Image (spheres, helix red, strand yellow):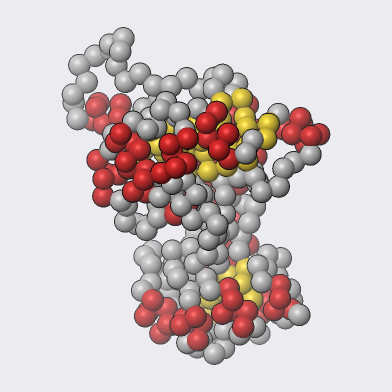
Amino acid sequence: MIPRTLVTRRLPPAVMARLRSETQLALEPEDRALTKSGIIAAVSSCDALLPSITETIDAEVIAAAPRLRVIANFGVGFNNIDVAAATGRHIVVTNTPGVLTEATADIAFGLLIAAARRFSEGERLVRARQWTGWGPLQLLGGDIAGATLGLVGFGRIGQAVARRAQGFGMRVIYQDRMRLSGGEEKRLGVEFRDRETLLRESDYVSLHVDYTPETHHLIDEAALACMKPTAVLINTARGAVIDEKALVRALRNGTIASAGLDVFEREPQLEPELYDLPNCMLLPHLGSATIGTRTRMGMMAVDNLLAVSRGERPPNCVNPAVFG
């Protein structure tokens, strides 16, 4: 069976070539998000849907697609999909785990360095032609070597960030739902802390948790108040893990020193005050944005999609209950 497939966004060239060769595209995707009504109109005659994490695939969308057999999400997270509604219709939902670990860890550590050393402020100063020359007190930032990095969430990406931190001579502590064995902690060179203690001890806090109801606004006013006034907060996980209004207040009031954000609660909109805060570095969700990583993600999504179309169990199913 050649599945009729809706791809909501244009993907890297090699992925698009494979989709054209191995599926029947419902329409040629553009490099912009489809509206919900556009998805509903296009998916009604489709066997497969390959959405990006920016599209909401809710019960209404699913109900509009009577032929749909698989939703192959282009991304690790799948909170944009109503998995329960899909499961109720015996539709397989898949994701693309693992392939973006190193690229996202690079962005997280890059944000740490940039926020610590005030790269964004320095670049704006130079581009505005306001730099008058070197000065001993100009844009002083925080030290990285010898500092303590706290990782909230210690899965694949958190562990990859820990490896980078050790190369910079940092002390690494972590918090996770499941503590590692003593042997694993020793091998990885990390120490376990409960969340409050981690926030109090860390010079840098980097977030690497899944987005769930339990992690919604995990970093709120109380959590920010636990941190050092010299601390830096990094988020490459999901935007809604941080209460953005509370973060604005913390950055404005000096509760923490600075932040580096690659994700936001209501992308592409930001809490308005964030745009003007000099001590907050902002990136447009670049975590997995390398040619190699996005191509591997796309190929994995297509592998998942085609496996279901052949009547097989896909490699990355997130709702195995559909298989009984």
What residue is at 46 percent from the left and 81 percent from the top? Answer: 61
Q: In which quarter of the image is the N terminus?
A: bottom right
Looking at the image, how many numbered discs can be counted on the residues? 0
What residue is at 30 percent from the left and 26 percent from the top? Answer: 122
Q: Where is residue 157 in the image (x, y as percent from the top left)?
A: 61, 44
Q: Where is residue 163 in the image (x, y as percent from the top left)?
A: 64, 32
Nearer to the camera, 272 or 165? 272
Nearer to the camera, 27 or 180? 180
Q: In which quarter of the image is the C terminus?
A: bottom right
Q: Position of residue 101 (x, y in %)?
A: 60, 47
Residue 21 can be seen in this image: no
Q: Residue furthest top?
A: 136
Q: Where is residue 302 in the image (x, y as percent from the top left)?
A: 61, 68
Q: Is residue 298 left or right of residue 125?
A: right
Vertical order, 162 against 4 (above or below): above
Q: Is residue 322 left or right of residue 204?
A: right
What residue is at 37 percent from the left and 43 percent from the top? Answer: 247
Residue 37 can be seen in this image: yes
Q: Is residue 34 left or right of residue 152?
A: left
What residue is at 43 percent from the left and 46 percent from the top? Answer: 220
Vertical order, 225 against 242 (above or below): above
Vertical order, 3 against 220 (above or below): below
Nearer to the camera, 60 or 291? 60
